[in-house]
Amino acid sequence: MFNLMFRKKYESRKYVDLIKKVSSNWANWDPPRPIQVGDYGMIDEQTGIFEKENNIYTAPSTAALCALHRSQAAPPEENIIYNAEVQHKGILDLTHFNIPGIAEASIKGQWKFNKNKTGALLVMAQPRITFLDEATLFEKLVGVKELDDKCLVTATVTCHAYAMYLSSQSEDSISLALHSTPSVSAAPLGLAGGESKLDWWSEKGAGVFRHGCAEPGTYSFTPMFMLKRKPKNDKFSSHRSALLDTMWEEVQVPWRPLKEGGEEAAVVNTLAGSQAPKTSEE
């Protein structure tokens, strides 16, 4: 029971950590929870969850500075899949399933997870990136004290359908398909060519599975985002705008390497041949 409770406590942090390793971006443990470009705050060290404090477009100290530098949206991309500690087994043959629309699923696949390893999977349907106009905006924000030591959301990845999975350290697998199904009103009538909606079909193991679907083009979910931190004043004074973008630092994870359950691994003092003092997690 203790191991199960311990795992649940840190499962969000483990998922965020795994996805960041394979994508260099931050994962949102709760994609329906909005995260917007311009949000700033901190990453919770225990959960890996971004805690918003304000937004540069609405905060009194930055709203006027940012008024002429709105975020920009790139065209939607093809479906994007990130996975860590899993083996992709290929496209599924779903023709034998008696489920309307599943044979023509726009996303379908099966992933098998390694034994004794925690794995993660993130699937996004036609995601769109929204980003800051960094080159002109960042210089204005360097002197804003409210952003000292804060994490700034410089880009978000939104989509109309997502699926995410965190494995249970066993040789389980997950099979997914994003397909169209008849709407509730059309189904009882057996209407062909009527209204339909997207839905996820899945067969999964004992891990944590979250998913969502909305109308295409709505971008209702934010499964992923990018964070940067403003440079120190001395670093800014020695370089100017040509290097301004690179001067804003990528935000690194605020925890030590994680064990499979998401708790921090002990740090070994190689000089003394002993472990560092334990934290409250150990």
Image: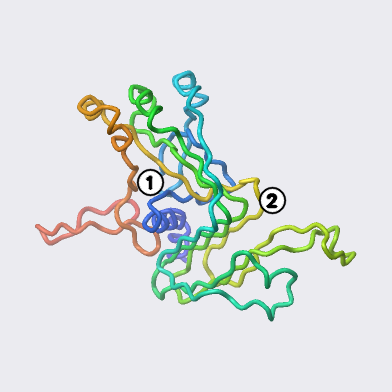
Quarter occupied by the C terminus: bottom left
Q: Residue at x 43, y 44 (%)?
A: 226
Residue type (three-letter) at the residue carrying disc 2: Glu
Mark number, residue 45: 1
Q: Please say if 31 is above or below 243.
A: below
Q: Residue at x 41, y 76 (%)?
A: 115
- Quadrant hosting residue 260: bottom left
N-term-proximal mark, 2 vs 1: 1
Distance CA(mark 2)–CA(mark 1): 34 Å
Residue 58: x %, y % from top left: 52, 24
The crowding category of the residue bearing disc 2, from other C-alpha atoms within 10 Å (few below 14, some 14 to 19, many at least 20), is few
Which type of secondary structure does the marked residue at label 1 adopt? loop
Q: Residue at x 39, y 55 (%)?
A: 17
Residue type (three-letter) at the residue carrying disc 1: Glu
Q: Residue furthest left?
A: 271
Residue 167: x %, y % from top left: 48, 67
Residue 128: x %, y % from top left: 54, 47
Q: Which residue is mark 2?
A: 215
Q: Nearer the viewer, mark 2 or mark 1?
A: 2
Instruction: Judge left or right: residue 191 versus residue 8.
Output: right
Q: How is the image coloured?
A: rainbow
Q: Residue furthest bottom?
A: 96
Q: Please say if 217 is above or below 248.
A: below
Instruction: Judge left or right: residue 181 versus residue 29.
Output: right
Instruction: Judge left or right: residue 5 versus residue 271.
Output: right
